[in-house]
Image (cartoon, helix red, strand yellow):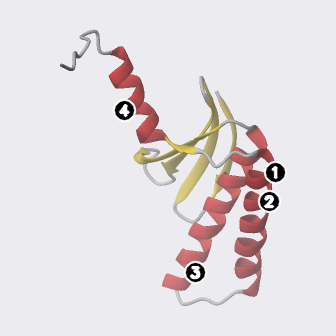
């Protein structure tokens, strides 16, 4: 279930419910496709929200750099969202885990054959 989303220039960072917490995933605004390589799972919702906001701010900043458009507001937004994410992450002890790692872990745990080491 989608809880919220933050938009960058080309991507939307969605916060969704997940069995292990809250998933932040990246969706292309043009095609609607998910980026399978970008997903992070957090235990706490505030940190997931902050991460999505920070990711969108970074993307807007990178796009403005590519366009060679300078904006103090964009720079301030990146700094503020980064500070907010780091503060919440530190206070709640939630740094997140890469979603690809979780998928690999789940795949391995579902394997029925047990391995014996001699």
Mark 4 is surrounded, within 10 Å at the Cα level, by few (under 14), some (14 to 19) or many (20 or more) other residues, namely few
Taking the image as shown, residue 91 lies to the left or right of residue 99, namely right
Nearest the viewer among 26 and 30 is: 26
Give the x, y percent position of residue 24. Answer: 59, 43
Q: Secondary structure at mark 2?
A: helix
Residue 64, numbered circle: 3
Q: How far, Cα to Cα, is label 2 from label 4? A: 29 Å
- The image quarter in which residue 114 lies: top left
Q: Position of residue 30 (x, y in %)?
A: 46, 54
In the image, farthest residue toward the left? 118
The residue to which callout 2 is attached is 87
Disc 1: CA contacts within 10 A as few (<14), some (14-19) or many (>=20): few
Residue 91: mark in rendering? 1
Q: From this view, report whether residue 22 is shown above or below residue 97.
A: above
Which sits earlier in the primary sequence, circle 1 or circle 3? 3
Foreground mark, 1 or 4? 1
């Amino acid at each position: 279930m989608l809880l919220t989303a933050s938009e960058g220039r080309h991507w939307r960072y969605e916060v969704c419910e997940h069995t292990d917490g809250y998933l932040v995933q990246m969706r292309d605004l043009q095609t609607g496709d998910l980026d399978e390589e970008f997903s992070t799972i957090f235990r706490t919702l505030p940190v997931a929200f902050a991460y999505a906001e920070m990711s969108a701010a970074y993307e807007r900043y990178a796009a403005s750099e590519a366009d060679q458009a300078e904006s103090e507001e964009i720079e301030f937004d990146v700094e503020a969202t980064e500070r907010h994410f780091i503060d919440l992450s530190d206070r709640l002890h939630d740094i997140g885990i890469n979603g690809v790692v979780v998928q690999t872990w789940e795949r391995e745990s579902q394997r029925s054959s047990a391995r014996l080491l001699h």
